[in-house]
Structure formats: structure tokens, C-alpha cells
Image (cartoon, grey):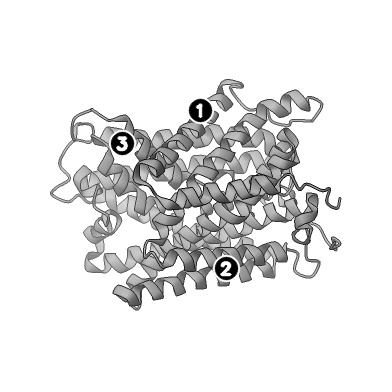
Amino acid sequence: MFPRSAAPRRELTLLDSTSIIVGIIIGAGIYRSSPDVAALVPNAAWLIGLWGLGGLLSLLGALCYAELATAYPREGGDYVYLTRAFGRAVGFLFAWSQLWIVRPGSIGAMAYAFAEYANQIWPRAEGDAAAGVMVLYAAGSIVVLSGVNILGVREGKWTQNVLTAAKVLGLSAIVLIGFLHAAPAAQVPVAAAGPAHFPLADFGLAMIFVLFTYGGWNEMAYVGAEVRHPRRNILRALLLGTLAVTLIYVLVNVAFLHALGLQGTRHATAAADVLELAIGRRAAQAISLLICISALGAINGQIFTGARIYYAMGADHRLYSWLGHWSARWGTPVRSLLIQAVITLALVIWFGLSRNGFESMVKFTTPAFWFFLALVGVSVFVLRWREPETVRPYRVLGYPLTPIVFCLSCGFMVYSSVAFAVEHRTWEAFWSIAILLVGAGLSFYNPIGHQ
């Protein structure tokens, strides 16, 4: 059993914490998902409404997390809450899913988004060569950013701050250009771009895209032990980060509609089309560079926070005690960062063989992600009942309605993702379920770890 030679230090300011949230949420998803959502909605009013609804549901979740994170400001986030609420077996299963499914799948998806657009800048390979180049780009981003985070919290947080600032400025440029220019096709009024009929199946699929793009607002909970003045700054970071991203996403889509109209927004190159109105043919490379920066910010943030989950698991479970080690030299959970990188690289290479790495990894992670997010919502009720004496600097606004609505929305996402997998027979989702079943079996082997 490995001793703990060091422990997390509180080095993250409110700016650092908010940058982690914004940087993780705003990846390449807004560029990929906006056209997909626009293709599903019946009119422009529904498009803006869905992005607003996604922000509202994320805000409800953030309020639930604010209560849990300020009451238990420790490394591990969801792992800590689920373990306290439902026992060590459920906590183990959550960490298992993060280690083998959710975290490497999410990091890998963003790594492939980075690779796809990096290939548009250089060398623009096609066919079989493109598949190999994208695997190299995706793997390289994981190796480099994992190395940066191993070197220390300061290096990881400043990398995150710089990347977050760059991507927010880039999106601000798209919004500004979108409001100042309009293509000839963008003459249909926003609220009258089609009939109002919206089938439930299309609504469910659209929300999968929207909420995937909002994913990451809960990441602040994983670094609670490294936040300065946690009882104050965790709540502020969760609210500021979620509200800022909601505003950005709504403005981006309004700008798309103003510049391109609903039909133009449905094109996969909508963001480049907006920039082309102002800078001409250079738009394609400019937007590719912007998306690369956005994807790198999301990758870095998820690497930074994900390793803290395995560190917390190693503290409680002898089977993974070697992960519960904080490096005194580097001031980071080096072993957790390394194992996270190795598993993610393996998935990147495996899914890269399908030439559809981004979509495959999203399908792979979705059912497990929303299942455990729903359990975290339930833990708000359980922990209030089981641990009423715990000091709660913040109590979720609108309790019990807020966590109920949040849990129901998570349940709907689980249903939608599984129904899609069954209908389309997507093997990625079934693989993740099989891995969860293996973890459920291992959870019975539950000896006490070091304290």
C-alpha cells in the first residue's frame, strides 16, 4: 500500500474555478451540435428555446451540486456524495465508470474533435491517411496536456485560463460578426421559420445534443479540496460558469439565425459561414483554429478534474490504493493522471479504427453519464435525511422541486440514449453497459482502503 506523501493544496481562485467550468463546457460541441439541433427543430423559436432550456436544466443541476460541494468540499465530487449517500459499493461503481467509460470517452471525443479540425489546417490528409493523422493528433493532445497537468496545478490551471479566454474571445467574435452581417438567405423572421409541430423523438434527440454540449458544469465538484474559500467560491464558480455559458450559447445561436437564417444554421459549416461574411475565404481555417483551441480547453479541464476522482477512490478502496497517492514533488495525482491517459489513448486508437471516433465515444459515454448524474440528484435528498447535522453553507434554492426536476431530466436522458441504442443497434452503448456490469461484480470485493 502506497503512503500519502502529500495532499491537495488550495490553489484555485474564483477565476481559476470559473475558468475550469467554462473551459470544460465550451469545447467543440457548440460548433458540432448547433447545426444538428437546428436540423431537428421545426422553427427558430424552438431552436433558441432548447438552448435556453438546456441552460436552465444545467443551472438546476448546478444548484444541487452547490449544496453538495459546499457541504463536502473534498477531492472526488460525485464519488464522495454517492459513497456517503448510497455506500462504498455505489461509490466504487461510479469511479469505475469514470475510469473506464465516461472520462476517457469524454476526453477522447474532444481529442477527436480537435484532430478533425487540426487536419483541416495541416496537413489536410484524406482517406486512410486522414484516419491515421487524426489518431496521431488526438493521441498527441492527450499526451501533451496530461504531461502539463502532471507538472503541477499551477501549470494546469494557467493553461486552462489561457485556453478558456481564447475560446470565449473567439465565440464573441462570431456573435459580433453574426449581429453585424446577414446573408441574403437570412431574411425569414426568427419565430416564423416553419410549423410548430415537434415530434417527441426529435425533441429527445435534440436535447441529447444540447445537454451534451452543456456537459461539464459539474466538474467543479471534483476539485473542491483545491479551491480557496470553498464554501463561498464553489457556489459562485458553479453559478457564474453555468450562467456565462448559457448566455454565450444562446447568443451564438441567435447570431447564427441573424446571419444565416434557420436553413443556413442547419449547415455543418455554420460557424465558418458566419466568419466568411466578414473575412472571406480565410474563414474555414480561422474557425478550424478556433475549434482546435476550444477542444484543447475541454480536454485540459477534463484531464485536470478526472484524475481527482481516481485519487479519491484510491483512498477508500484497497484494490485501487495505488491511485490514492498525491505526489509531493509535483503537487498532483501523478499516478491517476497517468492511468487516465493510458486508458484514454487505448480508446482513441480503438475507436479511431472506425473512422468515426467523436460520435462513437459520445454514444459510449452517454448512458453511464446520465445514470450517475441522476443518482447525484437523489443524493441531495438522501444526505439531508442521513446527515442532518452536516453544515450546509448553501441549501439548494427551490427544494425539493429543483432536485426533482433535475432528476427527472436526467432520467429522460438515460431513456433517450438507451432507446436510441436499441433502435439503431449501436454497439458502443452495449459495451459501456457490459463494463458497468463488470464493475458491479467487482464492487462486492470491497475491502477497506487506507485512511
Read off the residue under disc 3.
202
Q: Relative to 3, does residue 18 appear above or below in the rendering?
A: above
Label 3 or label 2, whichever comes before in sequence order: 2
Is 332 left or right of 108, judged from the image as shown? right
Residue located 51% across and 69% down the image: 141
- Helix, strand or loop at label 1? It is helix
Read off the residue under disc 2.
145
Q: Position of residue 440 (x, y in %)?
A: 65, 44
How crowded is the residue under tag 3: few (<14 C-alpha within 10 Å), some, or many (20+)? some
What separation in Å lies between label 3 and label 1 (alpha carbons)? Answer: 18 Å
Residue located 56% across and 35% down the image: 61
How crowded is the residue under tag 1: few (<14 C-alpha within 10 Å), some, or many (20+)? few
Q: Position of residue 56 (x, y in %)?
A: 47, 33
Q: Nearer the viewer, mark 3 or mark 2?
A: 3
Q: Residue 8: which quarter of the image?
A: bottom right
- Helix, strand or loop at label 3? It is helix
Residue located 24% across and 44% down the image: 258
The quarter of the image holding the N terminus is: bottom right
Q: Relative to 28, does residue 45 appear above or below in the rendering?
A: above
